Amino acid sequence: MSLRQMEYFLTVVDTASFTRAAASLHVTQPALSHQIKALERQVGGELLERLPRGVRLTPMGRAFLPHAELAVRSAVQAERAARAAAGAEGGELHIAALHALAAGLLPPVFARWRRARPGVELVLHEYARDEDLADSMERGVADLAVGHRPAPPADTAGPLREIGEEQIVVALPPGDPLAGAGRVPLTALADRDWIRCAMEPVVDGRPFIDLACERAGFTPRTAVRTEHTSTAVRLAAEGAGIAVVPSCVVPAGCPVVRLDPDWHRPLYVFARVPFAGAAAAFVSLLAGPAEAAAADRA
């Protein structure tokens, strides 16, 4: 069984056609069919059902598919990591990150990287939730991930390094009387309209804000629901309500207040294999901005 055969198989699945797959791969259709049949002989059964108009996966093919995807991604990842470690032109380093960190923490790190290593391209993959981020790393989508500590068993799959803390603040509408108050108890927000973000953490099966507000003795009055933290901040800045967000995504000039007791979460960088070469160099760049962000709450 070869990587080429698995690549051919995945292309047929993606295009749902031997004809289109052959054109995409720049091979003849008989050559493609020969490789797929050889692969099927090796695994002991048909992976694809040939239909009058296209193909579809057999039960064996559905079982084989995720493993073939991981094998091909791992091969691509190995090549780009080797090139990046050598500083070769055309080398790539793939970074997976939560959206808020991609928008707030990583831009200055990427800028510093481009000045220091212009020959190694950075590719950013953004995710809304921690579980999506961890899953992408399990599937070999990226070389490094930046987010919160992954849940077991992902937290033992490779190196894990704490790089600082994510400060959580409340973005306020312009002119809000709480602006400049420094820190306030959660109960001070009981009468506000809340902008809720799909990215907020889930604890014990419930959105964390619901749980925290319940413990404080009130139910948050939701005014707007959105997908991304950056959108939530913009909505707050326009007066649509308050938004609980990481401080790194709050633009200059937007009034904020911190909670008492403080809300913050450790940030980590993790990978499937030990940090080396370009990956290790990128990790070293992360500590400065993350620690600076954490110092903002002191």
Image: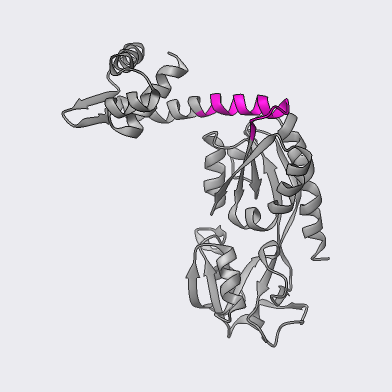
The figure's colour scheme reads one colour
- Residue 33 drawn in magenta: no
> Residue 106 location, x and y as percent?
69, 51
Whether residue 64 can be seen here = no
> Residue 54 location, x and y as percent?
22, 31
Question: Residue sitting at 74 percent across and 52 percent down?
Answer: 108
Left of 195 or right of it: where is 4?
left
Question: Residue sitting at 83 percent across and 65 percent down?
Answer: 298
The magenta stretch spans which residues? 73-92
Instruction: From the image, give the main secondary structure of the stretch colored magenta.
Output: helix
Figure disc tally: 0
Q: Which of 240 and 189 is in front in this view?
A: 240
Note whether 217 is above or below 203 in the view shown: below
Left of 45 or right of it: where is 6?
right
Whether residue 141 can be seen here = yes
> Residue 225 location, x and y as percent?
48, 70
For the N terminus, the quadrant is: top left
Question: Residue sitting at 32 percent across and 33 percent down?
Answer: 15
Note whether 53 is above or below 247 in the view shown: above
Q: Which residue lies furthest to the left in this view?
A: 52
Task: Give the quadrant of residue 215.
Answer: bottom right
Note whether 230 is above or below 273 in the view shown: below
> Residue 205 location, x and y as percent?
50, 58
Q: Nearer the viewer, residue 67 or 124?
A: 124
- Residue 89 drawn in magenta: yes
